[in-house]
Image (cartoon, rainbow, N blue to C red):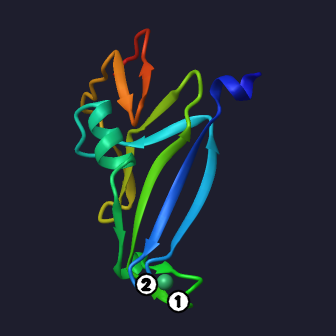
Amino acid sequence: MVDMMFEGKTVAKTKCMGCESTTSVEEAFIFLSLEIERCTSLTDALHHKFLAAEVLKGENKFLCAKCGTYQVAEKTCSFKRLPQILIIQLKRFKYVQSQQRFVRLDYRVQFPLEIRIGSDEVLFLGQTSG
Ligand SMILES: [Zn+2]
């Protein structure tokens, strides 16, 4: 019951640029943890951080099972299933290597009352501190 209400599922797809094979990893979540660095709104963070394609290169290269070596790859995240109630947690702390500590990202992140995620629509009601 609780799971159905709050549990969603994401799917991360990684496409190897060497052999073009794709690996999918599904993950259940209760809280959607969102990176917000340089984002001014929830929509911005969702589309430009969470749902945006990321290129894995350099130290982040992907170990491709088919190639047997580390390869440049493209990773995309999407929702496989949205919960009835979506809880979003903003990652307001960022580790700064040069200072060797976490700093708080305390700027305002606006959120809409309604947000479109793929073909689904999620309605946000109530208030948050933003
Ligand atoms: Zn490969």
Comparing 23 with 102, the one in front is: 23
Label 2 and label 1: CA atoms lie apart by: 8 Å
Tag 1, which secondary structure?
loop
Image position, residue 8 (x, y; %):
60, 36
Name the residue tied to disc 1. 67
> Which quarter of the figure is the N terminus placed in?
top right
Query: Which is more toward the observer, 38 or 56?
Result: 56
Q: Which residue is drawn at the image coordinates 25% and 27% (left, top)?
A: 108
Q: Tell me: residue 72, above or below residue 108.
A: below
Q: Position of residue 34 (x, y in %)?
A: 42, 41
Point out residue 89 in the picture as x, y percentages from the top left corner: 47, 33
Task: Give residue 25's quadrant in the image.
Answer: bottom right
Check the picture and name the quadrant holding the C terminus: top left
Residue 55, x across and y down, in percent: 34, 69
- Residue corresponding to mark 2: 71
Residue 56 lies in what quarter of the image? Answer: bottom left
- As displayed, is residue 39 above or below residue 110? below
Q: Nearer the viewer, mark 2 or mark 1?
A: 1
Residue type, label 1: Cys
Mark 2 residue type: Gln
Would you say the beta carbon of the disc 2 residue lies within 8 angstroms of ligand 1?
Answer: yes
> Mark 1 and mark 2 in contact (Cβ < 8 Å)?
yes
Q: Nearer the viewer, residue 85 or 120?
A: 120
